[in-house]
Amino acid sequence: MIQEAMHNWKRISAAIAAVFLAWSLTDFLLHGLLLMPTYEATAHLWRPLEEMKNWILHLVTLIAAGGFVKIYALLCSPKSLGRGTFFGLLWGVVVGISMGYGTYAVMPLPYHLALAWFLGTTLQGVLGGFLAGAIVKGEREEAPRVGV
């Protein structure tokens, strides 16, 4: 029992680390490279580069990755690549709609930025779900009981 709990903890920790790294890399590619010209053109909306709170962004990404993996581990059954990927798609669409279009509704952002945030977050959700599905395995899951 204790060995199985330790094994589950290790898998969940590995999944959190993998999702954090994948999301950090895709954030760099999306925001640090692809969208940088848009951010430069809308500089009046953002903190100056030297005032950015990058450590907070990394902490937020780590907490989001932890919550993402724990929700998958606790609520999705049976665990599989397909189930993880579908969970990630749902997560990505919900968070992406909020981030991209929710922000677009209240800030004077170019539309393509809202769309890029939505699509990027959806892609990150799918990637995170794939990783969680590949790394987090269910314990011997019982078939649902039917009847009384």
Image (cartoon, helix red, strand yellow):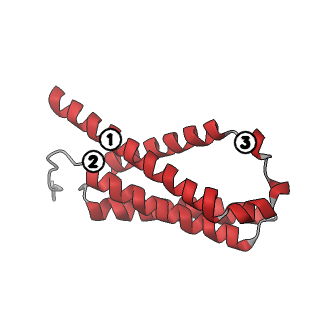
Identify the mark at residue 136; answer none if there is no mark: 2
**Could you say whether the residue bearing mark 1 is in a helix, strand or loop?**
helix
The quadrant of the image that shows the N terminus is top left
- The residue shown at (34%, 38%) is 13
Query: From this viewpoint, is residue 37 visible?
Result: yes
**3 or 2: tag closer to the N-terminus:** 3
Left or right: 105 in relation to 73: right
Above or below for 18 versus 94: above
- The residue shown at (55%, 69%) is 119
**Could you say whether the residue bearing mark 3 is in a helix, strand or loop?**
loop
**Label 2: how many Cα within 10 Å (few below 14, some 14–19, many 20+):** many
- The residue shown at (62%, 56%) is 32
Pick whichever, 107 or 48, lies toward us.
48
In the rendered image, which residue does mark 1 sit on?
14
Left or right: 47 in relation to 130: right
Q: Amino acid at mark 1?
A: Ala
